Image: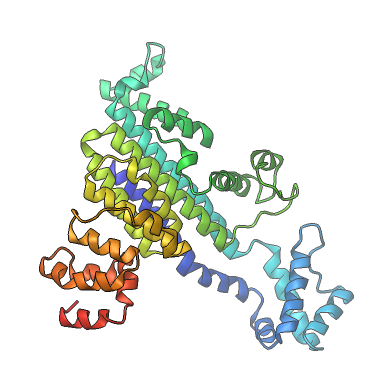
Amino acid sequence: MGWVVLRFQLAIDAYREMLNEGIQDIELLDERRLGANALAAVKTLPEANRQKLEAFLEHHADPETPSIDPEDSAVQKEVAAIFRGDRYAALSFLLGAREAMAGPRRAAIVRNSLLVMAISAFEVLLTGLISRRFVEYPDAMQADQKEFSLEDVRGFRSEEDAIDLLLSRRVTKIMYGSLDEWSKWFDERANAAFPPLAIDWDGLREAFQRRHVVMHSGGRVSSEYLAKVRAFESLPALGSQLNVNDEYLHRVLDQLDALGTGVAVLAWGTWLPAEREDAARRLLRRTYQTMLMDHWSVTEKLADLSGRVRCADDTAHSIRCNGWLSRAERLGYESIAGEVMPWDASALSARFRLVRHVLLQELEEALALVPSILAAKEIAPGEFREWPILRTLREHPGYAGVAETHQI
C-alpha cells in the first residue's frame, strides 16, 4: 500500500516541477514562432504600445472573430501604429502571429497535458487502492457461477488466473463510475468520503470536468460541463475556450495531493490495521514535504487527519503541529495561539516543548532550550537547519550565536 501512495505523490511532485521549471522553456518555443525580426521589434516597444499589442492579440484570439489577416489594410494600419510607423516590423509581426495562432500554443499543449496527467495519476491511485482492498478481502468481489464465459474458462491456467480477471473486472467497473460514486465507495469501506478531505470540493469537481472538456472538445465549454459545474456563480459561455494557466494548475495539483493522500492514508489504516503506524508516518512525511515546498493549504488539510488516524502520540502531535504551522504561515501566528496555548507539552519530549514555544512565538524561551536539546541529540543539527517549523527561531537575532557555538 505504501508504494501505491508514494508513486502518486512522486507523480504530483513531478508535475509541479515541470510546471515550475519547464514551462518557461516551452513558452520560448511559442515566442520563436513569431520570428526573430518580430521579436526584436516587440522588445523595443514602450509599455503602452505593448499593452495595445496584447489587446490586439486578445481580440483576434477570440474564436468569434476572424483570424489575423496580414493582407488586410486596416489590420496593417492598426499594427503599424503600434509599432510606431515601422511597417516592415508590423508586417513581420503579422506574418509571425498568423503562424503562431494557426495552431495550438506549445505552452497550452503542455498545460493541458499536465492537467490530464495529474488527474490520471489520481485515478491510478484509486485503482491501486481498490485493487489492494480486493486482494486483502477477496470475498468482497462476490463472484457467482455466471461471472465467466466458456471462452474465459478455457483460457484459465489456474484458479489465480480466474481471480486476477475477476479482480480486474471489479476494479474497472468501479473506475467507470463518477467522482461522486468513488467518494461513496470509499466512504462505505474506509470512512473516507471525498468532500471533507478536499481543500475545495466544488473546485476539484470542476477540474475533472475541465479535463473532460480538454480531452473531448478541444477545451471548448460543453453543455455537459455547464450542467456539472452549476454550483459556481459565474459560468463561461457555451462554446467558449477554457484555458489552463499556471495558477489553475497549481490549485488542481494541491487539490489532488490533499485528497489523494488523505483517502489513501485512511484506506490504508482501515484495511491493514497492522500497518496503521506506517500509514500515519506516510501522512506525517507528506505534511513535512509539502511544508518544504510552501504548499501550506495541502499541509493544513492533511493535518486535519491527525485526530482520525490511529497512531503513536508522537506521530499525532507532529502532524498536528505541522497543521498549526501551515495556518500560521497563511494567516499569522496569532491565528493559532488560541489552540496552541492549551496544549500541555510539559510531559512530552523536549522537541515538542521547543515547538510549542516557537508556535507561540516565545522565541527567547525556545532559544534557551536549544543547547540541551542538541546535547541530548533529540533534534539533529540538520533538522535545526531545515525544519520549517523553526524558521522564525532561525531568524531570531540570538540564534546565530547559538548556532555557531554548537556548530549547527
Q: Residue 78 location in percent, x, y?
A: 84, 78
**Residue at 36% from the left image edge and 41% from the top image edge:** 264
**Residue at 56% from the left image edge and 44% from the top image edge:** 208
Q: Residue 197 location in percent, x, y?
A: 45, 43
Q: Is residue 187 shown to the viewer in this render?
A: yes
Q: Residue 373 location in percent, x, y?
A: 16, 67
Residue 374 as seen in the image, left or right of residue 19:
left
Quarter residue 226 falls in: top right
Return the residue found at the far left: 376
Q: Quadrant of the C terminus?
A: bottom left
Which residue is more in the foreground, 285 or 3? 285
On screen, residue 242 above or below 76: above
Which residue is more in the foreground, 252 or 83? 252
Quarter residue 369 falls in: bottom left
Q: Residue 11 location in percent, x, y?
A: 39, 53
How many numbered marks are there?
Answer: 0
Which residue is more in the foreground, 51 or 95? 51
On screen, residue 43 above or below 275: below
**Residue at 74% from the left image edge and 83% from the top image edge:** 48
Q: Quadrant of the N terminus?
A: top left
Residue 205 as seen in the image, left or right of residue 283:
right
Residue 171 as seen in the image, left or right of residue 27:
left
